[in-house]
Amino acid sequence: MLEIKNIHKTFNVGTINEKHALKGVSLTLEEGDFVTVIGGNGAGKSTMLNAIAGLWPIDEGSIIIDGKDVTKLPEHKRAAFLGRVFQDPMNGTAATMNIEENLALANRRGQKRTLRAGIKASEREVYKELLATLGLGLEERMTSKVGLLSGGQRQALTLLMAALKKPKLLLLDEHTAALDPKTAAKVLETTEQIVQKNHLTTLMITHNMKDAIAHGNRLIMMMDGKIILDIRGEEKKKLTVEDLLHKFEEASGEEFVSDKAILG
């Protein structure tokens, strides 16, 4: 479903701030893979995600989604293949519009706009049923402005919106990092339900080793613009934080120093 082939990205070329953020990254995701991505600050996690999303052009290499080479496609054209949830709960939804209007926007993604009535009664029932699966009571607040929701409620809604059209690839960029632990756990539980129910191919960046181990069928670790670990199958199921730290030290020759990632 996703092939990244030898991609490179350098920022601020020729200046004192030059940064080679991606150094020949290659990665293949099969349909239905749920891959968690871990690594310290500056490892290249978000740069890789943004390269897939088309936020900026890569310097070298290729990106293929479901057999289609999207390397040269701009961000807005890649949106037809992708669903995305950002770190900031304020992104991904329209705060001044209500819940059902946000869902309608997501449902019409990629379609031509017309002058027909905004939301049909049958459509409203579908949204109500979808919202009920979140267990947050939002199905009773469909006309509430999204700006009045809590951060966790907005992230859960954004997840629902991102998955509504069953994208080829779901990108989650540290989507629980701005939430308190209890809310983050609920959003991760919701993520797992949505991914499994819709059989979505998913790439989830997290700053938390425990979350990276607990979720998905595969884990990759990045360091200095490269993938240094790729763990899957039974090995992933049996993995502990201590095992992961040991593997990191073996692969990198360094000690992992991010307390935030270890303790979460």
Image (tube, helix red, strand yellow):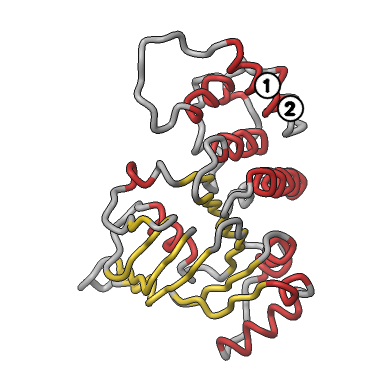
Instruction: Tell me the distance, in whole angstroms, between the alpha carbons under discs 1 and 2.
Output: 6 Å
Q: Left or right: where does residue 43 sit relative to residue 182?
A: left
Tag 2: amino acid: Ala
Of 49 and 15, nearer the camera is 49
For the point 75% across and 49% down, the residue is 185
Q: Which residue is mark 1?
A: 128
Residue placed farthest to the left in the image?
Answer: 14
Mark identifier at residue 132 = 2
For the point 49% across and 30% down, the residue is 106
For the point 70% across and 49% down, the residue is 192
Of 199 and 83, nearer the camera is 199
Q: Position of residue 2 (x, y in %)?
A: 46, 60
Tag 1: amino acid: Lys
**Disc 1 crowd, CA 10 A, few/some/many (<14, 14-19, 20+):** some
For the point 58% across and 18% down, the residue is 123
Quadrant of the image containing the C terminus: bottom right
Q: Position of residue 4 (x, y in %)?
A: 41, 67
Q: Left or right: where does residue 107 sit relative to residue 131?
A: left
Q: Are dots 1 and 2 in contact, CB under 8 Å?
A: yes
> Within the image, what quadrant is residue 37 found in?
bottom right
Q: Position of residue 91 (x, y in %)?
A: 49, 38
Of 30 and 218, nearer the camera is 30
In the structure shown, which secondary structural element does the residue marked by tag 2 occupy? helix
Of 13 and 231, nearer the camera is 231
**Disc 2 crowd, CA 10 A, few/some/many (<14, 14-19, 20+):** few
In the structure shown, which secondary structural element does the residue marked by tag 1 occupy? helix
Please determine whether, in this image, residue 105 is positioned above or below residue 44.
above
Number of labels in the image equals: 2
Q: Left or right: where does residue 35 sit relative to residue 28?
A: right
> Within the image, what quadrant is residue 127 found in?
top right
